[in-house]
Amino acid sequence: MKILVPVKRVPDAETTIKVNPEGNGIVEAGVKWVVNPFCEIAIEEALRIKESGVEAEIVLVTIGTSDSQEQLRTGLAMGADRAILVTADNSDPWVVARVLAKIIEKESPDVVIMGKQAIDDDSNVVGQLLAELIGWPQATFISEFKLEDGNAAATCVREIDGGLETIKVPLPAIITADLRLNEPRYASLPGIMKARKKPLEEIDAGSLGADLTPMLTVKSLTPPAERKGGRMVESVDELISVLQTEAKVL
Amino acid sequence: MGNVLVYAEHAHGKLPKATAVAVTAAKEAAAKMGGGDVILGLFGSDVSGLTDAAGKLGVSKVATLESPALEHHAADVAAAALKAIAEATDCDRVVFASTSKGKDIAPRLAGAMGASIATDVTGINDDGSIERPMYAGNAFATVEMHGDKKVLTVRTTAFEAQADEGSAAVEAVGADISAPANAIQFVSVEETKSDRPVLTEAERVVAGGRGLKSGENFTTVLEPLVDALGAAMGASRAAVDAGYVPNDLQVGQTGKVVAPTLYIAVGISGAIQHLAGMKDSKVIASINKDPEAPIFQISDFGLVADLFEAVPEMTEKVKGL
Ligand SMILES: Cc1cc2nc3c(=O)[nH]c(=O)nc-3n(C[C@H](O)[C@H](O)[C@H](O)COP(=O)(O)OP(=O)(O)OC[C@H]3O[C@@H](n4cnc5c(N)ncnc54)[C@H](O)[C@@H]3O)c2cc1C
């Protein structure tokens, strides 16, 4: 089976993000760029499917600038087979979904496993939107994935507001990973060496015939309202007392 | 321009507060994004028990759609139902609360309608642009949504809940909704049972982190304080990942967003991803044994203490109030 894993280059979750003085982006100096943590989980899941004995090809795809090659190489070093870089602006969920729809047309994967959200814009949109555009079913926010019926379907456990939901989804489908699906591995040294020789195809988004008109324009960014804190109390008694008399919440 | 549709989420024969919050946001969307009436879109296999409550949500009309295919939540069928309701009621904007169901359906509906979509909206500006957080709340973006058709999911902490008001007419939409050939199948649901207030609606939240060290300690150390305060219980991702508590208690960037009157963080370090889900609480108090824990920087009141001593002491004293 062919597993397509879309990935995104984002600032590391450990980096403290600051809005730039112009208010049109973030301060990029000192930012470490990584594979979006949810995408990493998606790659790991694809690898585990392959390692469980299913004959599979794992294809990574990213939309972005050539800088994103670095993240594709990381995924290849983890064990994916080949990668596709589509050069286009990746800040608009509709554009990303339309481009991915074209890649799916071209690649005909049996399943798409991707992160539920990217930790830069925190949109949580592309998977579901893509599923609608191509008429596939979706299993979102999943914490368990199991192939069934000779790989014609998958049983997925979804993290929902009230607990956990189990559904069976026929393939092909769009699967979006939540945090607890697995713990992604680190790329090994031999993995990194091998990754250098794995195919990485570059496609200009224009050549795919996808509509690249964005549906959103970010006009400005502002830092969040600062929260004043830091006052310390000495004892449980004092804590209860300030909550009662000053904050008036007890 | 047309009207504004609200997704009426429901479970166990009830409309949660999130639906009432979405109504308020929809009223703002009507006022600032091109006018129109606010209509509630209520669908399911049988919604007859819900129409009374729905009619009292301060909307112009309740549009219902029933089909056996809508018995269990499935994003594709739900999006088809909402699209049919939107068309029948002349709605070009649709508002959801940012709940797990809302987040699952809204982008599909945007795809089906050809609408622009913005998620986790925290405000609607007078010029029709919206505000939303990015980078785990380290930035707020002012975003212009293109086209006449728009889909929004809104943060439930950012808008007030619509109070009961009026009794809107209920009108059934005559569309035939069936499951597609490649439909998902519902297998089962495992709901976390609790008599406590709902985490996202509670006035008080007591949340525990990795510092609790075990699920048993959540039960024996933290829960008595939670209950003495009549609070809901929350948790950090680390506590959920370690299996101490169920996933639906996770507060943060990728969990639930809460803004209670009082949030008490116990044995939680205060990672930015956790703060993203609780920083808008009115009063934050935290208990941590590490004086350098980042949680203290955003806490109104911080207590450096071993939680295994401080929490039981606090529980006893709160009970005595
Ligand atoms: C993509 C991504 C998404 C994430 N989403 C979320 C999210 O939604 N929500 C979330 O919470 N996290 C999230 N995280 C994880 C986050 O980065 C932190 O790892 C997590 O919040 C840490 O949880 P914690 O504070 O319980 O654990 P720790 O950081 O390990 O802190 C434990 C704290 O307990 C204190 N402690 C220990 N023993 C005691 C004691 N006896 N008495 C008092 N204090 C004690 C310690 O001093 C420490 O400060 C996410 C991370 C990533 C990468």
Image (cartoon, grey):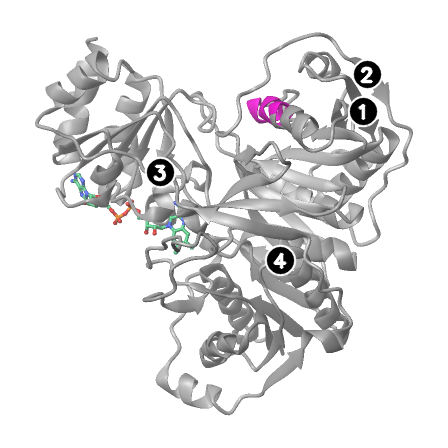
User: Which residue lies at the image location 84% right of the left edge and 36% below the top edge?
Assistant: B84
- Measured in 3D between alpha carbons, the distance from the residue under mark 1 to the one under mark 3, in whole angstroms, is 37 Å
B221 horizontally vs A164: left or right: left
Query: Which callout, 1 or 3, points to the residue nearer the camera?
Result: 1
Classified by dominant secondary structure, the portion drawn in magenta counts as: helix
> Is the residue marked 4 within 8 Å of ligand 1, measured from its CB?
no
- Measured in 3D between alpha carbons, the distance from the residue under mark 4 to the one under mark 1, in whole angstroms, is 33 Å
Q: Label 2: few (<14), some or many (≥20) within 10 Å?
A: some
Q: In this view, does B57 lie above or below A20?
A: above
Report in which chain the residue with disc 1 lies: B
Q: Label 4: few (<14), some or many (≥20) within 10 Å?
A: some
> Is the residue marked 3 within 8 Å of ligand 1, measured from its CB?
yes
- Measured in 3D between alpha carbons, the distance from the residue under mark 4 to the one under mark 2, in whole angstroms, is 38 Å
Element type at marker 1?
A: strand
Rendered image: mark on residue B64: 1
Q: Which residue was labeled with disc 3?
A: B235
- Image quarter of the C terminus of chain B: top left
What's under tag 3, amino acid-wise?
Ala
Report in which chain the residue with disc 2 lies: B
The picture places residue A65, in percent across and down from the top left corner, at 55, 74
Which residue is nearer to you in this view: B216 or B257? B257
Rendered image: mark on residue A92: 4
- On the same chain, marks 2 and 3? The answer is yes
What's under tag 4, amino acid-wise?
Asp
What's under tag 2, amino acid-wise?
Val
